[in-house]
Image: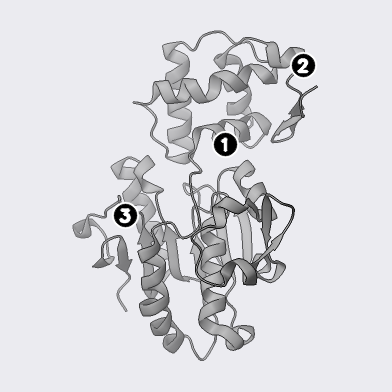
Amino acid sequence: MMEDKQFGDIYFDEDSILCRHKISPMTEPEFQRIVEFMQRMYGIELKDKRTIVKGRLDNHVGKLGHKSYSEIMDVVERNPGGPEGNLLVDLLTTNYTYFLREFDHFEYWKNKVLPELEVRVGRSKDLRVWCGAASTGEEPYTIAMILSDYFGLDNIEWDTGILATDISVHALEIAVNGIYPKEKLTGLPYGWRDRYYRNVDAQNAQVIQPIRDKVTFSKLNLMEAFNFRKKMHTIFMRNVMIYFDSMTRMNLLDRLYDVMEPGGYLFIGMTENIDKKKTGFEYVRPAVYRKPL
């Protein structure tokens, strides 16, 4: 028998009757229902991605015992935060990431932004960073390692905790564990592999506990209110807005502006851009923006 699989709170094994259950072909009204739900709940635009939606869902929905997409959507719409809703989000969101993705951002943040913020918040030593699309954890752990390198022996005096959020429960489970295939660690800066990881087995390594302790992972829908106790000095919101329509992007940018300290920095994906005429953020360099002091 093959290994059991888990999606949210639902378990099944690949030899079970449920796994062999065939779901009815997706109809156009069912596709539109899924599109509207994902847009309404999460801001994700899928209207031109029927092939992707069908491809990602066809092999999984039937395993939950549902006979049609209408049937599973009835369950999802009644309880979006339930197992079926979590599964839908996990399958229809893209969690592609890797350590040091878009490396120029991290280099600029360490060499230009952190020295500026260190001076500005040096009295309180309270530096607040939010990674708004944490996925499986590579990005927030990269940020934590950079902070550890930057502050060195003084790190213990600073509160450099990182808030890392995502809507995918499955991705966050991987992130919390911090265990990655060793091939993902190739290309890391000199010394990081030995300093910040410990071998789990021949194939995998885990981020060390002090770095994992620096990151607080939490499920957060970017369409919902941000109820932070304090404002952020840096927000990494990279490769998220490419999935939103223009109105959703502007709404998100307005709310990011509101939860950022004056002089704070916003990093977005290199393929993304902001209409500077419609936002209060100042352009700094490609994919880097700043809230004026």
Q: Is residue 93 left or right of residue 282?
A: right
Please name the residue shown 70% across and 54% down the image: 177
User: Which mark identifies residue 90?
Assistant: 1
Q: Residues within 10 Å of mark 1 (few under 14, many from 20)?
A: some
Cβ atoms at labels 1 and 2 below 8 Å apart: no
Q: Nearer the viewer, residue 207 or 195?
A: 195
- Give the mark nearest the N terminus, 2 or 3: 2
The x, y position of residue 223, in whole percent, is 47, 46
Please name the residue shown 32% across and 40% down the image: 245
The quadrant of the rendering that contains the N terminus is top right
Q: Amino acid at mark 2?
A: Ser
Residue 48 visible in the picture: yes
Residue 257 visible in the picture: no
The x, y position of residue 143, in whole percent, is 51, 67
**Which is more foreground, mark 3 or mark 1?**
3
Image position of 189 with respect to 17: above or below: below
User: Which mark identifies residue 16?
Assistant: 2
Q: Is residue 147 left or right of residue 174?
A: left
- Give the mark nearest the N terminus, 1 or 2: 2
Q: State the image quarter where residue 267 is shown.
A: bottom left
3D distance between C-alphas at marks 1 and 2: 22 Å
Q: Amino acid at mark 3?
A: Met
Q: Amino acid at mark 1?
A: Asp
Q: What residue is pinned by disc 3? A: 270
Cβ atoms at labels 3 and 1 below 8 Å apart: no
